[in-house]
Image: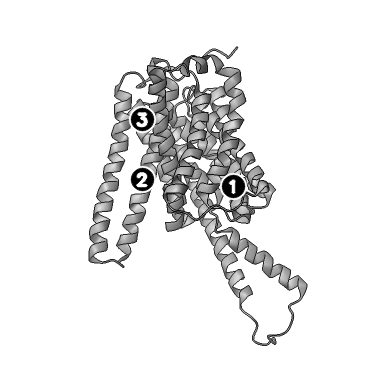
Amino acid sequence: EPPETPSRPSQRDAGMAGPDVSSRILGELLFFLGLVAVSECIRKVARWRCPDHPVVNALLISSLTLGWYSTSITLVLLNKWVVSSWMGGGLKFPIFYTMTHMILKGVFSVLYLGCTGCPRMRPLDWKVLRIASFIGVLVGLDVVASNLSFQYITVTFYVMVKSSSLIWILVFGALAKVEPCSPQIATCVLVIAAGIFLSTCGEADFNATGFTLVLASEIFAAARWVGTQALMTDRELDTVTAVLYMSPGSTLSLLPLVLAREHEEMVILLEGGRQTLIYALLVIVPGFLAFVLLIIEVKLVQETSSLTLAVLGNLKSVTTILFAILVFRESATLLQWCGVMVGTAGMLCYSYFKKGKNAIQDCDAGFAKVPQASEPKHEVMPHAQSDEIRGKMSKLSSKDMPCPLFLACMR
């Protein structure tokens, strides 16, 4: 039998009851959408007057950032409210709720590829599909662990623990040889770990189960982002097609858990009637927001630098905490805020060192492509030097796919 729903601490219940919560979440969404509308109106006027002015591109980045904040923060707040307080007692089938999102991502991917008039998909590569399916399994486990953690912890503590993603990304990246490590980067990891330790110690209603679920979510997330980087670097896949390939694995990975823990609830839900209709409306909204978030993230990656994304991602974490305090009446101690600042400093230092390392690789690859004036053009290059240059060029091409840190920060 499934375990009993855990008793919830008072702080986690504060501000969660009543229809005012959904109104406050809607207010947060409308606030950001209003800012997006204002930014877009100003950008249209600026583009009409001075099409090539740098302010036009700055306003585009502003609109994308506000849209990113809107969808990302709304998803976190909405999932917390649904899992903890939907219809009074919280959602009784959070695993099926997550599995439905995985199905919707595949559906929206097909619709997007069909509506945007994209080129015809290439013949299916079964090796790519197997790799994408495995990554999809990690995606499903990552998201379901995150959603289940909302039964035990606050959004504030959830966001703080999420900062540990960089640590696991660097560990798995070093093992997979897609994220090189250095003394400077290792120091940044220690600083981030110190920030997480401070945030954990400052949590008044610490819950070991919730903390373990978020930590497990971050381990799955790190493994899947490193795998995604390797997949999209080695194979010519666009982001939406990759999501489509991952969707079956994400869905099927959660099906056994649904059948084992939530089969009775599923029988009632699938009988039809008013409750089924309400659930359908409930799950479509966050499913659509999650897909829109993906499209915005891809556009942001194209328009900004990795350092800019790191700064915006850390600012988003702080903004999420502030809105969690406003919407759910949560609280954060001074020690926790200190932990957030320490972790943010570590992430920014990582971004700085990473950007410097990429610049050096660009320089090396550029020099490698320039032929030596003293050498005849017909001279054959030695194998050792040729291999070295090919290695440098492979490093350069691998940066076409953004570092998994920034993709993880954008979730």
**Mark 2: amino acid:** Gly
Quarter of the picture containing the N terminus is top right
| Left or right of 240 in this view: 230 | right
Which of the pair 265/271 is nearer the observer? 271
**Which numbered disc covers residue 67?**
2
Q: Identify the residue at horizontal 36%, vertical 45% (top origin).
A: 67
Distance, label 2 to label 1, CA atoms, is 24 Å
Task: Indicate which disc residue 325 carries.
Answer: 3
Q: Nearer the viewer, residue 120 or 303?
A: 120
For residue 284, above or below residue 303: above
Mark closest to the chain's N terminus, 1 or 3 = 1
Crowding near the residue tagged with mark 2, few <14, some 14–19, many ≥20 C-alpha atoms within 10 Å: many
From this view, report whether residue 314 is shown above or below residue 257.
below
In terms of secondary structure, where does tag 3 sit?
helix
- Structural distance between the alpha carbons of marks 2 and 3: 21 Å
* Residue 328 visible to the viewer: yes
Residue 139, horizontal then vertical, whole percent? 57, 37
